[in-house]
Amino acid sequence: MRRAWFLPVLVVVSGSAAAAGLFFRGSPGAAAGLLVVFVLLAGLNSTLIFPRSIDASEAERRSAIDGRPVVFWRPGCAYCLRLRLRLGRRAHQLHWVDIWRDPAGAAAVRAANDGNETVPTVVVAARPHTNPDPAWVRQQLSRRP
């Protein structure tokens, strides 16, 4: 849990320090603008914009029932963010597993990627696909039963 929020908190603290420096130098408008930018960056790197994560066993169970792909991801991953943003509203049709919150999910990703925790790893029909093109993932959603 702590790892998932480390990067966003670090971004906000850094932005606050930089904004405080600008504020005390007599630029309150620039300080406010900078702080807003850092808060937005923290939000993009947090778990807030991703659909609610479930654990790997629950995701596999649900995927077996409804045929939806499972996405293994972690906060702060630019490729995960790219996938999430490009999927748009359709992202809620997938089962998302945060590997920093679920050790079994991290183990599944390592098993699929030669011991590396490379994300996003998307599992479709029990076959893992590492960092797939978002258009391909959308296609898989269209093909499911």
Image: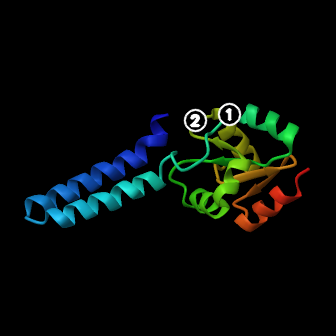
Compare marks 2 and 1 and give the one earlier in the sequence. 1
Element marked by disc 1: loop
Residue for point 63% across, 39% down = 53
Residue 97 visible? The answer is yes
What's the mark number on residue 108?
Answer: none
Q: Mark 2: which amino acid? A: Arg
Residue 130 is situated, as x and y percent measured from the top left of the image, at 72, 57
Element marked by disc 2: loop
Q: What color scheme is it? A: rainbow
Within 10 Å of the Cα at label 1, are there few (<14), some (14-19), or many (20+) other Cα atoms? some
Residue 133 visible? The answer is no
Q: Nearer the viewer, residue 145 or 18?
A: 145
Give the residue furthest to the right: 145
Q: Mark 1: which amino acid? A: Asp
In this rendering, is residue 3 above or below 7?
Answer: above
- In the image, is 26 to the left or to the right of 135? left
What's the mark number on residue 101?
Answer: 2
Residue for point 62% across, 34% down = 102
Residue 111 is situated, as x and y percent measured from the top left of the image, at 75, 44
Residue 1 is situated, as x and y percent measured from the top left of the image, at 50, 34
**Residue on which the image places disc 1:** 55
Q: Nearer the viewer, residue 60 or 66?
A: 66
Within 10 Å of the Cα at label 2, are there few (<14), some (14-19), or many (20+) other Cα atoms? some
Residue at mark 2 to residue at mark 1: CA–CA distance: 8 Å
Residue for point 64% across, 59% down = 88
Total numbered labels placed on residues in the image? 2
Q: Residue 132, located in which quarter of the rendered image?
A: bottom right
Instruction: Mark 2 and mark 1 in contact? Answer it, CB < 8 Å.
Output: yes
Residue 7 is situated, as x and y percent measured from the top left of the image, at 42, 48
Residue for point 53% across, 50% down = 49
Q: Residue 40, located in which quarter of the rendered image?
A: bottom left
